[in-house]
Image: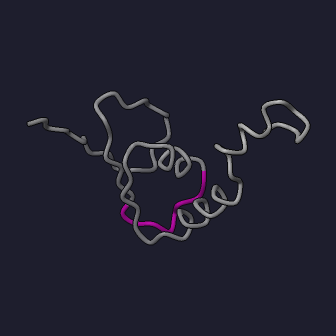
Amino acid sequence: MYKKDHKFYNIAQKFVNLASIIFYKKLLENASELYLIDSCLHALALLIDVSKANPKICYKRESRFEYGIKKFDYYNLIFIQK
């Protein structure tokens, strides 16, 4: 995060909203079930306590990055183009 007088501050504020991050953190921590896709929300869930949720399922892409943290059951997400 940039200080208010930094030249990139206004640009960064369009993409970073601390209130939203805290909201999503609380939402994930208090969820009774989690069904996520491999996304930034999933990455956040890997970093916080989501022990209240059962099941914890993540639908992953074929090119998924391996984080080395095993909190979720993973299933492949397959896209079929017509």
Quadrant of image for the N terminus:
top right
Residue at (61% x, 66% y) in the render: 26
Q: In the picture, residue 77 is in which quadrant?
A: top left
User: Does residue 18 belong to the magenta stretch?
Assistant: no
The magenta-colored residue range is 48-55
User: Does residue 53 belong to the magenta stretch?
Assistant: yes
Q: Return the residue nearer the eye: 68 or 61.
A: 61
Residue at (55% x, 66% y) in the render: 27
Question: Up-down: is 20 above or below 69?
Answer: below
- Residue 38: give x, y in percent of width and height: 40, 42
User: What secondary structure is the magenta-colored segment mainly?
Assistant: loop
- Residue 62: give x, y in percent of width and height: 28, 31
Q: Return the residue nearer the eye: 32 or 16.
A: 16
Q: Return the residue nearer the eye: 63 or 82.
A: 82
Question: Up-down: is 77 above or below 65?
Answer: below
Residue at (38% x, 53% y) in the render: 36
- Residue 30: give x, y in percent of width and height: 54, 70
Q: Classify residue 64 as left or right of residue 26.
A: left
Q: Classify residue 46 as left or right of residue 4.
A: left
Q: Tell me, what colour scheme is on the image? A: one colour
Quadrant of image for the C terminus:
top left
Q: In the picture, residue 35 is in which quadrant?
A: bottom left
Question: Up-down: is 11 above or below 51?
Answer: above
- Residue 48: give x, y in percent of width and height: 60, 54
**Farthest residue, direction right:** 5
